[in-house]
Amino acid sequence: MVMPIIMSIKPKRALRRIKRARVSGAALLLMLLAPLLNANQPAIIDYTDRFHPVVSESGMVVSQEALASRIGADILAQGGNAIDAAVATGFALAVTLPQAGNIGGGGFMMIYLAGEKRTLAVDYREMAPLAAHRDLFLGDDGEVDKNKARYSRYSAGVPGTVAGLLHALNSYGTMSLQDVLKPAIKLADQGIRVTRSLSFSFARAEQRLKKSPASTAYYFLKDGSPLPEGHLWKQSDLANTLKKIANTNGEDFYQGSIAKKIVAQMQEHGGLISAEDLAAYKVVEREAVTGSYRGYEIAAMPPPSSGGVHLVQMLNILEGWDLKASGHNSADYLHRLIESMRRAYADRSEYLGDPDFNPVPVAELTDKSYAKKLRDGINLQRATASSAVKPGLTLPEESPQTTHFSVWDKHGNVVSNTYTLNFSYGSGIAVAGAGFLLNNEMDDFSAKLGVPNAYGLVGGAANAIEPRKRPLSSMTPVIVFKEGNPVLTTGSPGGSSIINTVLQTILNVVDFDMNIAEAAAQPRIHHQWLPDQVFYEEDINVDTRKRLEAMGHVLKSSSRVIGRTQTISRDERFIYGANDTRWPGGAAAGL
Ligand code: GLY
């Protein structure tokens, strides 16, 4: 049952709110006593908040597309657990959010199993084909051929999504694959109405998508115009692919007729993925990266994502300061954030990669004494030039088009899943007859090694292309705990800004006592060491920006929003869901 928008509040916070809100004596008494009242009594709306989460007693799914959130919530209502709902949501997003929801890409899923009190990380990142090699994307002139790296069949890694979702379901779900896939198949078969934002997004990607005849057929009308708002969009090829996955437990995708279609396309047009690559694809279960922050425990995605390592590293640096005293999004606060980001992203360029190929010094990077050393080197009055922090490669450009969803069930199981095609619509190339797009995740490798970049720097060997290796990612699905119990989960798209988006969400909740909808709505900043620029959303106060510039920071308005979180939190009584409204169409669906 979805509750009206009501919030239980801590007595200390209530007092602070009451000071601001001027309420009657009776209301004041009720507010102070609220946390002590019988659990069946509704709690009290925190009317001073400007943004409110959806509230439920029994379960929540939050994703970037409302139909997919609803499908996940329906699975919970049928008695499925969080993993069943997550897998149903993941497949549904492949139908309803073709920009980023996918079966032709890969991703990461954090799972908390309440019964076992165990957290685990499912790595279903794409793998480089066996025929890939270090200089795959270098032209004769030694420069990176961006077109080949991003928009050709060479840019596709071996897709991991189908294997990853099935691994989660088979290992930790309770429902049959047929049952969790049924809603996605129905949407693809019977069609969905194209929304305004989906039509806009087809139009925006037109040039790229039209290079692929299959993509042109799937996302455009016969007259060549993008599928318009309101159009009933049926995806029969995708529906057939999903049915084959359901009927063969995924085998057809990796070793059967779908695999043949992928390979045929590679052989016809150039591209490296072979039948052996698909058959050899492996999901890896990994230990979460763990840390602590002001009494909360953090469990986040380990390498080959850099997300968990650098989230914990930045929290460790920031824990040494009283951020609340600086004031939310003040210049003093943002300066501390920027300097922490600068140092963490410098380390990212040097040390992070696929741990199955090169050891990643996770323990060292997430050590609190290392964070203290970094913190002690930060001048609180002046920006440090990135050139003075550490030499290394410029980070490869990363696209913001990824998508995250979070699920929480009534048993306390939690799923935090981020997956992607890399760019919006990935490589733009659809598999003919199979109805889905191929990723361009190979561009997340460091394409240019041993060749000095524009700054004259060399490095990044840990993320060089190698056969069967997974490219470095920034995706940061995370679960936050208090005294061993999960209290919050979040994640975001946004390429290299994902880690900083998740960081600021956690700080908003922990340090600034915001509810998760308020936390999502705050303007964000992003710094990634190189380029030495602070990207900001326009709502960052103009005086604050001037103060930061006076401290030596170079500020640049972000041309797009920074992140889009999908967050769930929980207290003793309720489960709260918040979709970040930076893009239309998402929803928190409670039951
Ligand atoms: N493709 C974006 C990421 O994995 O971080």
Image (spheres, rainbow, N blue to C red):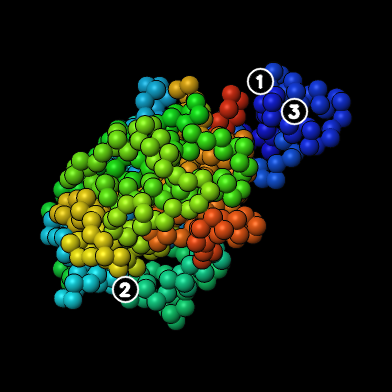
The numbered dot on residue 15 is: 3
Residue 137 in picture, x, y percent from top left: 21, 67
Q: Is residue 11 left or right of residue 470?
A: right
Picture quadrant where residue 368 is located: top left
Crowding around mark 3 (Cα neighbors within 10 Å: few <14, some 14 to 19, many 20+) is: some
**Residue at horizontal 34 percent and vertical 68 percent from the top:** 428
Using the numbered discs, state the Cα–Cα distance from disc 2 to disc 3 in whole angstroms. 60 Å
**Residue at horizontal 33 percent and vertical 58 percent from the top:** 395
Crowding around mark 1 (Cα neighbors within 10 Å: few <14, some 14 to 19, many 20+) is: few
Q: Secondary structure at mark 3?
A: helix
> Do tag 1 and tag 3 residues touch (Cβ < 8 Å)?
no
The numbered dot on residue 39 is: 1
Residue 564 in picture, x, y percent from top left: 51, 52
Indicate the amino acid at tag 1.
Ala
Q: Is residue 552 above or below residue 68?
A: below
Q: Is residue 406 above or below residue 550?
A: above
Q: Is residue 468 above or below residue 17?
A: below
